[in-house]
Structure formats: C-alpha cells, structure tokens
Amino acid sequence: MNPEIKHQLLLKILLIACIVSTAIHFTDNYLYIEQYPQPDWITPPSIYIAWIVWTVIGITGYWLYKSRRFWFAYLCLVIYSFCGLDSLGHYFYGSMSEFSIKMHLFIVMDGLVGLAILGFTLWSGLILKEQFKESQSIV
C-alpha cells in the first residue's frame, strides 16, 4: 500500500473514532445536561448543533485531505480536533468528584481522539510536509 493511501486510511480511522466518541459524549451531555458541570450558556440545542457543525467540518477536512487540498484540509482538521479537545473544558467548571466514572471516560476519550486528530494534522503538515510535496509535483 502506498504511503498516501496509508495516511488517508489513518485519518479515516481517527475521524471515525472521533465521530463515534464525540457522538456518545455529546449525546450523554445532551441527555444528562443538569448533571454535567459546565457554563450556563451550554444548552441541549447548542450541544446538538455544535456536534453537527464540527462533524461536518471534520468530514470536509477528510475530503479535502483526500483531494490533496492540504491547507484547507489542515484548517478544517485543526478546527475539528476541538470537537474532542473542548470536552476537557468540563474540568474547568467542576471538581473531579462531581463527575461520574462514565463522564470521566467520555471526556477523556474525547480529549484523546481530539488530540489524535490534531497530532495527525501537525504530523502531516510539519513532519511529512505533504502540502509542499503537492506543490513540488506540480512544477
């Protein structure tokens, strides 16, 4: 398998993991909103809408990456990584004991998959420099 296909497959796996993890956590947060320590401006509709918008951005990032439009893909993927990373923000609004084991699991899993998406994006852009390989092959 060529490296380009491997990188696309890795990103697809990370994206699916992030979509599943955030869907589970956001659904739990939506259903049990009164149990989650968080700011008052977070409401059930804002949770639902945020997950949809972020997921569309993530899927768009994957499509752009696959289409070799790296700069736009990286922008979308960095934005999408915050779909998972922002879950860690719950810890700014409550003590560790205020969260159930289930909540901790969902929050940490979201943080890890968000970090993985961000890590992939940085690896692709800063180490592999795929965006520069594209411009060199055009010349």
Image (cartoon, helix red, strand yellow):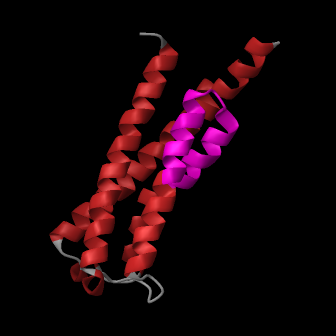
Give the residue drawn at x 25%, y 70%. Answer: 28
Figure quadrant of the N terminus: top left
As drawn, the residue found furthest toward the top would be 1
Residue 129 appears in the picture as rendered: no
Magenta region: which residues? 56-81
70 inside magenta stretch: yes
Q: Quadrant of residue 132?
A: top right
Residue 90 appears in the picture as rendered: yes
Q: Is residue 31 above or below residue 118?
A: below
* x and y percentages locating residue 105 in the rendered image: 23, 62
* x and y percentages locating residue 67 in the rendered image: 60, 28
Give the residue drawn at x 47%, y 18%. Answer: 5
Please identify the dominant SS of the magenta region: helix
As drawn, the residue found furthest toward the right would be 139
Figure quadrant of the C terminus: top right
Give the residue drawn at x 24%, y 83%. Answer: 98
Give the residue drawn at x 62%, y 41%. Answer: 74
**Nearest to the observer: residue 57 or residue 14:** 57
* x and y percentages locating residue 118 in the rendered image: 51, 46
Looking at the image, how many numbered discs can be counted on the residues? 0
Q: Is residue 53 above or below residue 38?
A: above
106 inside magenta stretch: no
* x and y percentages locating residue 136 in the rendered image: 77, 16
